Image (cartoon, rainbow, N blue to C red):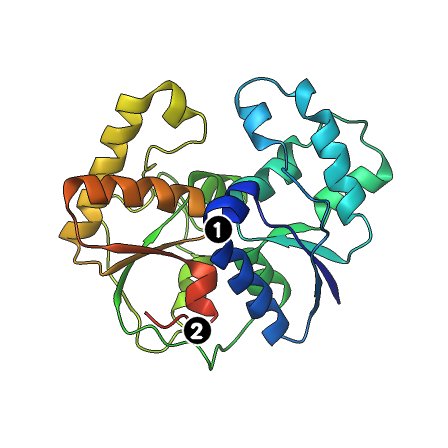
């Protein structure tokens, strides 16, 4: 199986260790993983600000880079949601449709495609609160949103429960937005900050040593909020935990 690794621009710039952990984790399962060096952005920032037409060149480059792979895997639910649902500024050729359909976020790829049953190298003896990114939760269906009267499921928690020593703590409002929201945090900074403060306060009251998520963007926002409030919890991407991060 030939995998194209897409590392979102903000991960590449601010948390490259998340991209490295994703690569190492996929290789642990014997997959052939390649990183196209010409990759840039998925186009989400432009789409979020209403400048979708301006994303056309970025979208075309994404398709060019990733059209030759069996799957495209990225450590970001928001970027994968962008590709699968909103990569529409360019003509929808068969090639474009194929790339969109085979693009997966890391958690869903491990859970739904590889159907991972064990992670013998992974140990994380800490109390962990899981943060559901909004696009991951409601866009690509990582878990059941609390507003739906439906059977509970959570792909991230299914994987985390395979990690030795981990203890999952319950949040009062487990799938409430943290306030990042991409450009929302730029245009509505006060509202964004208050939402972030509410979120990290909930985590601290639950006794979390670490907050884990599948999206670094939310984690970066929450980390800044926690530091400003003087709260002790740390923040780490799920790829690092599943890859056996020592923390």
According to the picture, the residue beneath numbered tag 1 turns out to be 142
Q: Residue at x 26, y 22 (%)?
A: 190
Mark 2 crowdedness (10 Å alpha carbons): few <14, some 14-19, many ≥20: some
Image spot of residue 16 (x, y percent): 51, 54
Q: Residue at x 65, y 38 (%)?
A: 83
In the current view of this chain or complex, which residue is farthest to the bottom? 120
Q: Earlier in the sequence, mark 1 or mark 2?
A: 1
Q: Is residue 138 left or right of residue 199?
A: right
According to the picture, the residue beneath numbered tag 2 turns out to be 244
Q: Residue at x 59, y 64 (%)?
A: 23
Quadrant housing the C terminus: bottom left
The alpha-carbon separation of the residues under discs 1 and 2 comes to 22 Å
Q: Is residue 161 left or right of residue 191?
A: right
Q: Residue at x 59, y 44 (%)?
A: 80
Could you tell me which secondary element the residue under label 1 belongs to? loop
Image spot of residue 183 (x, y percent): 45, 26
Mark 1 crowdedness (10 Å alpha carbons): few <14, some 14-19, many ≥20: many
Quadrant housing residue 58: top right
Q: 164 and 151: which one is in front?
A: 164
Q: Is residue 174 visible?
A: yes
Could you tell me which secondary element the residue under label 2 belongs to? loop
In the current view of this chain or complex, which residue is farthest to the right? 94
Q: Is residue 115 visible?
A: no
Quadrant housing the N terminus: bottom right
Q: Name the mark nearer the viewer: 1 or 2.
A: 2
Q: 145 and 76: which one is in front?
A: 76
Find residue 57 and name its label. none
Quadrant housing residue 53: top right
Q: 214 and 161: which one is in front?
A: 214
Q: Is residue 98 left or right of residue 223?
A: right
Image spot of residue 163 (x, y percent): 39, 74
């Amino acid at each position: 199986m030939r995998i194209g690794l897409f590392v979102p621009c903000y991960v590449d710039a601010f948390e490259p260790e998340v991209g490295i952990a994703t690569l190492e984790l996929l290789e642990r399962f014997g997959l052939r993983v390649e990183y196209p060096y010409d990759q840039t952005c998925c186009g989400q920032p432009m789409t979020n600000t209403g400048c979708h037409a301006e994303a056309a060149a970025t979208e075309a480059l994404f398709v060019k880079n990733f059209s030759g792979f069996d799957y495209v895997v990225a450590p970001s639910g928001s970027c994968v949601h962008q590709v699968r649902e909103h990569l529409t500024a360019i003509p929808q050729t068969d090639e474009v449709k194929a790339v969109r359909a085979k693009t997966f976020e890391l958690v869903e790829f491990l859970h739904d495609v590889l159907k991972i049953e064990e992670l013998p190298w992974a140990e994380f003896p800490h109390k962990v609160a899981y943060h559901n990114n909004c696009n991951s939760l409601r866009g690509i269906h990582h878990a059941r949103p609390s507003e739906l009267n439906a059977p509970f499921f959570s792909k991230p928690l299914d994987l985390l429960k395979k990690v030795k020593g981990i203890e999952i703590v319950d949040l009062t409002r487990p799938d409430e937005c943290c306030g990042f929201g991409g450009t929302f945090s730029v245009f509505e900074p006060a509202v964004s900050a208050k939402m972030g403060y509410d979120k990290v306060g909930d985590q601290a009251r639950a006794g979390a040593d670490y907050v884990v998520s599948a999206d670094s963007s939310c984690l970066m926002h929450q980390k800044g909020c926690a530091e400003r409030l003087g709260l002790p919890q740390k923040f780490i991407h799920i790829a690092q935990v599943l890859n056996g991060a020592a923390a």
